[in-house]
C-alpha cells in the first residue's frame, strides 16, 4: 500500500472479513440498521453513508487488508496509483470509531479514539482488477484516511471505469 505524505497521529493495519463485500467505520453509539438503498450505494459508488456510519464496498467477499490513518488535516494526494477514491463524512459524537466487517461482533471491533465531532473519510481502493476468476483471491487493498472536517456530501474523486 502507498504511504501517506502526512504522518498520521494514529495508524492501524487490519485484516477485515468483508462479508457481503463491505466493512464499516461507525460511531460507537450509532444504530447499525442500514437503509434500503445501502446495497445500491455500495454497488454504484463503493461507499455508502447513513448517520454515524460509512460503509466501504470491497471487490472480494473475503478477508481484505485495510490500513486506517488519522490525520490532522486534509491530505494532498496523487490518485494515480489507486483504482477508485471516494469521500464521505462521519459524525462521531462518542469519540470512538469502530472499524469492522458488517457481520463482526462489534464489542470486539477495533476502536479508533478521536475527539468527538465530524470527520471526513477518504477511501483509496487498489488492486480491484486483480481478482481470480472465482473472485476469492486477489490483491485488492484499501486505505482509509480520516481528518476533522465539517459535513459534506459523498464525493467520488476517482471512479473505477467498471462502475
Image (cartoon, rainbow, N blue to C red):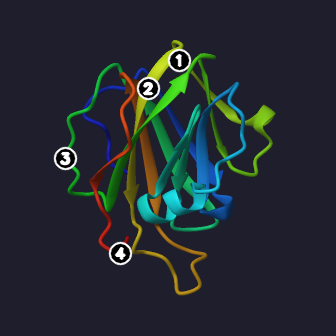
The residues bearing labels 4 and 3 have C-alpha atoms spaced at a distance of 21 Å
Res 114 label: 1
The Cα–Cα distance between marks 2 and 1, rounded to whole angstroms, is: 9 Å
Quarter holding residue 19: bottom right
Question: Looking at the image, can residue 58 be seen?
Answer: no
149 over 13 or under it: above or below? above
Mark 3 residue element: loop
Q: Residue at x 30, y 57 (%)?
A: 82
Whether residues under marks 2 and 4 lie with C-beta atoms below 8 angstroms apart, the answer is no
* Label 4 Cα neighbours within 10 Å, binned few <14 / some 14-19 / many ≥20: few
The answer for how far apart the CA atoms under marks 2 and 3 are is: 21 Å
Which one is in front, 3 or 117? Answer: 117
Label 1 residue SS: loop
| Mark 3 vs mark 1, CA separation in Å | 26 Å
The mark lying in front, picked from 4 and 3, is 4
Mark 2 / mark 3, whichever is N-terminal:
3
Farthest bottom residue in view? 133
- Residue 46 x %, y %: 46, 58
Query: On the image, which quarter does residue 71 sit in?
Result: top left
Q: Tell me which numbered mark, 3 or 1, is placed earlier along the sequence.
A: 3
Q: Name the residue tied to disc 4.
A: 162
Q: Earlier in the sequence, mark 2 or mark 1?
A: 1
CA gap, disc 1 to disc 4? 35 Å
Question: First in sequence: mark 1 or mark 4?
Answer: 1
Q: Residue at x 33, y 58 (%)?
A: 84
Residue highlighted by disc 3: 78
Q: What is the total number of numbered labels drawn onto the structure image?
A: 4
- Dot 1, how many residues are within 10 Å of its Cα: few (below 14), some (14-19), or many (20+)? some
N-term-proximal mark, 2 vs 4: 2
Q: CA distance from mark 2 to mark 4?
A: 29 Å
Residue designated by label 2: 119
Q: Residue at x 41, y 39 (%)?
A: 88
Amino acid at each position: 500500500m502507498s504511504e501517506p505524505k502526512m504522518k498520521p497521529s494514529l495508524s492501524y493495519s487490519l485484516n477485515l472479513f468483508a462479508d457481503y463485500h463491505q466493512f464499516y467505520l461507525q460511531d460507537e453509539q450509532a444504530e447499525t440498521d442500514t437503509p434500503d438503498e445501502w446495497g445500491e450505494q455500495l454497488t454504484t459508488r463503493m461507499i455508502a453513508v447513513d448517520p454515524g456510519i460509512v460503509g466501504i464496498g470491497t471487490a472480494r467477499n473475503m478477508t481484505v487488508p485495510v490500513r486506517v490513518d488519522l490525520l490532522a488535516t486534509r491530505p494532498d494526494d496523487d490518485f494515480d496509483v489507486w483504482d477508485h477514491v471516494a469521500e464521505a463524512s462521519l459524525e462521531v459524537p462518542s469519540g470512538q470509531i469502530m472499524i469492522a466487517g458488517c457481520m463482526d461482533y462489534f464489542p470486539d471491533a477495533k476502536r479508533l479514539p478521536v475527539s468527538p465531532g465530524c470527520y471526513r473519510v477518504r477511501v483509496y481502493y487498489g488492486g480491484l482488477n486483480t481478482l481470480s476468476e472465482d473472485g476469492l483471491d486477489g490483491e485488492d487493498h484499501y486505505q482509509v484516511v480520516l481528518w476533522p472536517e465539517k459535513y459534506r456530501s459523498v464525493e467520488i474523486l476517482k471512479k473505477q471505469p467498471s462502475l
